[in-house]
Image (cartoon, coloured by chain):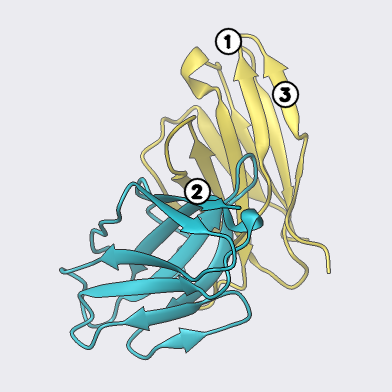
Amino acid sequence: DAKTTQPPSMDCAEGRAANLPCNHSTISGNEYVYWYRQIHSQGPQYIIHGLKNNETNEMASLIITEDRKSSTLILPHATLRDTAVYYCIALIGTSYGKLTFGQGTILTVHP
Amino acid sequence: DAGVTQSPTHLIKTRGQHVTLRCSPISGHKSVSWYQQVLGQGPQFIFQYYEKEERGRGNFPDRFSARQFPNYSSELNVNALLLGDSALYLCASSLGNYNSPLHFGNGTRLTVT
């Protein structure tokens, strides 16, 4: 799995968009980018994943650069409940159930 | 629909004892994975089971073992507990297909004294 690099922490004002960056410069052509988040004392929660194209679901949008060396997770209207550790993971597939979690980004949403 | 359920939610054991943790996957999910999360770190992969067979194993000692039952539920067993085994143990389930997301339970908090 390609190594991913994320800033250790970020702040965001409630109601504003939160843009969380992830660098994966060594990603291979068949590796997907997955995003999970973990709210304190809970298990990680799946957010979104993508390969090349931008993706959007009810939780967030994922923007992947054309060269696929980096991506951005966008929470369009952050709320206090979005305060969590956000993990960016690059992997070929989930068939073997193995996700490699790094340190992630601690996102703090302020009132 | 019910998510991944784990039991118990909290557990206190003494060094040298044995522990069994249980996981019920989301209905229809055939793959179960186990993770260990030590305070302040991201989860670390322990095992994956698919259709009752071990499909993957992380870098954990043989004191750790698991199994999956015909109804796809799973147990994680840890023998000869050490203080360093104190952690949040997470179970995740998925369809087991190439790219199906893993869905996690809220874990079992194990404290070894």
Dot 1: few (<14), some (14–19), or many (≥20) neighbours within 10 Å? some
| Distance between the alpha carbons at the discs numbered 1 and 2 | 22 Å
Q: Amino acid at mark 3?
A: Leu
Q: Nearer the viewer, mark 3 or mark 2?
A: 3
Question: How many numbered discs, if any?
Answer: 3
Q: Which residue is mark 3?
A: B11
Of residues B51 and A64, which is closer to you in this image? Answer: A64
Residue B96 picture location, percent across and down:
56, 71
Q: Colour of chain A?
A: cyan
Q: Chain of mark 2?
A: B
Mark found first going from the N terminus, 3 or 2: 3
Mark found first going from the N terminus, 1 or 3: 3
Q: Which residue is mark 2?
A: B47
Residue A12 picture location, percent across and down:
47, 58
Residue B55 visible in the snapshot: no
Q: Amino acid at mark 1?
A: Gly
Of residues A22 and B82, which is closer to you in this image? Answer: A22
Residue B62 vertical placement versus B99 (above, below): above
Left or right, B9 with respect to B47, comes to right
Circle 1: element type? loop
Residue A72 picture location, percent across and down:
36, 73
Name the residue at the right extreme. Answer: B1
